[in-house]
Structures are given as C-alpha cells and as structure tokens.
Amino acid sequence: MNNIQNILQHYWNYSSFRPLQKEIIESVLSGKDTLALLPTGGGKSICYQVPALAMDGMCIVVSPLIALMKDQVQALHQKGIEAAAIYTGMPFPQVKDILQLAVNEKLKFLYVSPERLTTSLFLEYLPGMHVQLIAVDEGHCISQWGYDFRPAYLKIAELRDELPKVPVLAVTASATPKVQEDICNKLKFSNHHIYKGSFLRPNLSFSVFKVESRITKILQILHNVQGTAIVYCKSRRMTQEVAQLLQLQQISADFYHAGLSNDERSAKQEAWLQNKTRVIVCTNAFGMGIDKPDVRVVIHHDMPDCLENYYQEAGRGGRDEDSDSRRRKF
C-alpha cells in the first residue's frame, strides 16, 4: 500500500488531505529537504507519517518532549503501526532492545530525543538501520532552544553526516522568517522546499480585557464559557495561586509547571486529558504536542514572552474545529 491517498484512508479514515499536506508529502517522497509551516491543529504529524508509510524502511522522528513521543507512539500502535521511542532517563537494556528492533527492521517509526541522537550507543546502531526519512517535529525548537538550554538541538544535523542521502522534513506551527532561515541552516538544507499554510483559524475568536481583578474576570469567563480550559501564567507560584482560587469557587482546576516531578506532571496532564480536571493552570511548560481537541477557552493571565508563544498557546483551543460556538482566546 504505497498510494498516499490509500494510506490516509486506511490508517486515519480521512477521505482527503488538509491544505498543503499532499504537497508536503510529495516533496518528501521526491527526496527533497522540506520545511513545513502549518497552523496549530493543522495535521503536521501526517506530513511525515504518511510518506514514511509509503516508503520502505524506517523514519527517525526527532521530538522535543517525552510526553509528545509517548502520545504519538501510542497513537501509531492503535493503528497497528510499529513504533518506539528512546529518550533520556530510559534504562540502558530497554534502549538497546529498541535499537536492535530498529536494526532488525521491526519498527516503522523511531522517536528520538535530540540528546539521544549523538550518544555513542545510538551511533553504534545507526549504520545498521534502514532509514528513509528524518522528521524534526516542532522544528522551531532548533532556533528557540538550541542556543539556550538544549544545545543538542544544534547537533541534529550531525545525523545527516551519517545519512547523507536521506531527506529531512522539519515541521512547526510558528516560525518567523529569521527562525525559518535558522532552521534551514542548522539542518543543512539544500535545494529545499518551504511550504507555508494559512494560519487563519476561523473557529477561534480573540478578546482583550482591561480589568481591575484578573481572577474575577477569569471566573466570569469560565462561568460563561463551558468546557475544558487552559489558563497560562508566567510564574510557577501564580499557577498554584490561581488554581487554588478557582477551586474555592467549586471549579475543577489543577496547576502544572516544570518544577513538578515527571510523575506529577504526567498525572495532572492525564487527569485533564480525560476530563477529570476541567481547568489546567500552567506555565508555558504545558502544551507543546498536547492534542486535546475539545479545549473551549484559553486564557492568558499574563502576557506571553513573544507573539510566537501566544500563537502556539492560543492555538491549543478548538482543534476539533467545532464552529457551533467560536472558541475564545483571552
């Protein structure tokens, strides 16, 4: 089954591609390095999963977050597609077992954190893998994080030295022209294609309020707009304070930030995804790669650091494209 339309229908039960998905997939299948900029909820993962399924061999997916890798591997397993992930903190024997599966051509997708790419163990097994595509998910992290706290992002291109004939696809939902150029340079793109989708989300509406009390306004919004919600705050302390104030008003809420343990973060995220918690009050540590389709309101208690972050965070609402009532962003 190598026809991309048949693959889309068989595994995703979609009758047609979203805008630009087909063009991006065809670019990848032609062997071109490709940068794809699609809106949040625009189906970026399909852009590398479909061509990988149309090819022989395996796709290496470089992904920034453990939760994101786990979610995607689980989703692929549910479709009957063999996939696995290796990331920092995994037991050594487990990593070796997964790498051996990759060498034995038992995997279609191998998700890898940037830090794992350049380890001696990974590089030892890499020559034995039949890799046909390298996908870099959340490609803007190369520019946004690579110079700061995750320098391993700047070493992704070293993978190209080992696999010089393998095309690279980088996907992202937010990249200024400068960041686009940085991504292409850092990944050593040449003779490449860039596809930019429309970032208009007609099912979203945006509002700005000047208020005396932020928490009073947040309570008013949450009473008026039913359903799942995200409230973004700049500090860890504020996430706890706002969550506690919401709880005092009998609103099901919890807080989330990078200072919590992995187990705590996973438990809080899972409770929210399963609608056991209605409102997650969080820093920007929450959200990348989280695909909950029925978020009805996103509120910013504080201003984000930049417009790109605001777009990413606001775009986590209304991914089910429900147009009966416009999703609200504040």
Image (cartoon, grey):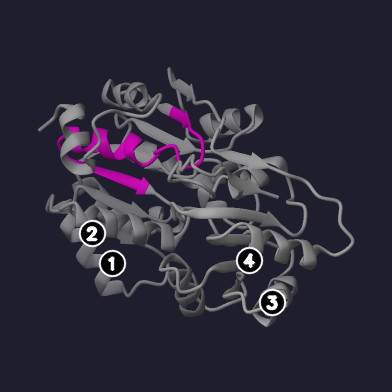
Q: Which mark is residue 282?
A: 4
Discs 4, 3 touching: Cβ within 8 Å: no
Residue 304, image x, y percentages: 73, 51
Residue 57, image x, y percentages: 17, 40
Residue 316 visible in the displayed image: yes
Disc 2 target residue = 99
**Callout count:** 4
Residue placed at 30% from the left, 32% from the top? 166
Q: Which mark is residue 95?
A: 1
**Considering the numbered disc 2 on the image, is that residue within a helix, a strand or a loop?**
helix
Q: Taking 149 as reference, is 276 above or below it?
A: below
Q: Give the quarter of the figure containing the N terminus.
A: top left
Residue placed at 70% from the left, 71% from the top? 236
**Considering the numbered disc 4 on the image, is that residue within a helix, a strand or a loop?**
strand
Separation of residues labelled 3 and 1 (CA atoms): 36 Å
Q: Taking 69 as reference, is 257 above or below it?
A: below
Separation of residues labelled 2 and 1 (CA atoms): 6 Å
Q: Taking 65 as reference, is 257 above or below it?
A: below
Residue 216, image x, y percentages: 79, 67
Discs 3, 2 touching: Cβ within 8 Å: no
Q: Amino acid at mark 2?
A: Leu
**Mark 4 closeness class: few <14, some 14–19, many ≥20 residues within 10 Å:** many
Q: Amino acid at mark 3?
A: Gln
Q: Amino acid at mark 1?
A: Val
Separation of residues labelled 2 and 4 (CA atoms): 35 Å
Separation of residues labelled 3 and 2 (CA atoms): 41 Å
Disc 3 target residue = 240
Magenta segment boundaries in residue numbering: 35-61
